[in-house]
């Protein structure tokens, strides 16, 4: 893939929330996305997901996520096709900070940030509340039933609507 984003009609930033099921497909509970050029926001919660994603995934759309494997697993769990073009911001960050050469003094290097919040902080980008995210994950792991006021609804939507990498 080239670095020229003008080749894409749409750029979709997505995030999902799900219940992990060891040895099985994840159980999706939220899919949130924002198309960056138009500003359209897509939010689907438990029981609202159809047989296709609400956003474009064809060859003229770029699907952007942090640790995209999770979002792709949700696509598969829902029986959705996978996007034609994927940009994983975690992989891009790792590629940016990795050093291929070994240090001559054999001193261990500091571990580079890998989580979303650590990476945002690394680049000086305002991040979400770690405590709120931890609370949300704990609640999701408790499983169903979920209510309309659950924190994951706010957090997942906020992540894509106030995306720090949104240049538009």
Image: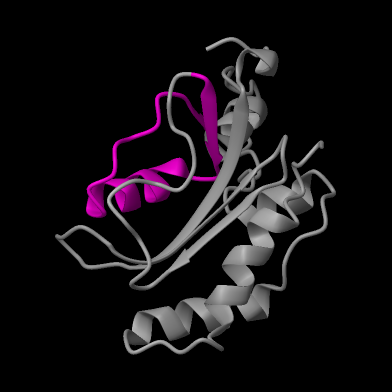
Q: Is residue 103 above or below residue 51?
A: above
- Residue 106 seen: no
Q: Is residue 78 left or right of residue 62?
A: left
- Residue 89 seen: yes
Q: Is residue 45 left or right of residue 92?
A: left
Whether the magenta-drawn stretch holds residue 69 is answered as yes
* Identity of the residue drawn at 58% across and 82% down: 151
Along the line of sight, the residue nearer the viewer: 76 or 23: 76
* Identity of the residue drawn at 33% across and 46% down: 52
Q: Is residue 117 above or below residue 108?
A: below
* Identity of the residue drawn at 33% across and 53% down: 74
* Identity of the residue drawn at 85% across and 49% down: 124
Give the image quarter of residue 17.
bottom left
Q: What segment carries the magenta color?
A: 60-87
Along the line of sight, the residue nearer the viewer: 166 or 36: 36
State the scheme by which the image is colored.
one colour
Give the image quarter of residue 168.
top right
Along the line of sight, the residue nearer the viewer: 3 or 127: 3
Q: Where does residue 66 sit, x and y in percent of width and height?
A: 55, 45
């Amino acid at each position: 893939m080239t670095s020229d984003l003008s080749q894409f009609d749409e750029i979709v930033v997505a995030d999902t929330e799900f219940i992990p099921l060891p040895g099985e497909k994840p159980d999706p509970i939220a899919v949130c996305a924002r198309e960056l050029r138009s500003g359209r926001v897509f939010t689907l919660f438990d029981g609202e997901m159809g047989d296709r994603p609400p956003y474009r995934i064809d060859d003229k759309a770029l699907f952007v996520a942090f640790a995209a494997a999770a979002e792709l697993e949700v696509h598969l769990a829902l029986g959705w096709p996978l996007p034609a073009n994927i940009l994983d911001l975690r992989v891009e960050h790792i590629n940016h900070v990795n050093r291929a050469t070994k240090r001559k003094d054999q001193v261990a290097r500091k571990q580079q940030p890998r989580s979303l919040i650590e990476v945002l902080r690394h680049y000086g980008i305002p991040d979400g509340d770690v405590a709120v995210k931890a609370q949300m994950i704990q609640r999701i792991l408790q499983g169903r039933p979920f209510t309309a006021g659950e924190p994951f609804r706010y957090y997942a939507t906020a992540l894509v609507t106030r995306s720090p990498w949104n240049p538009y």
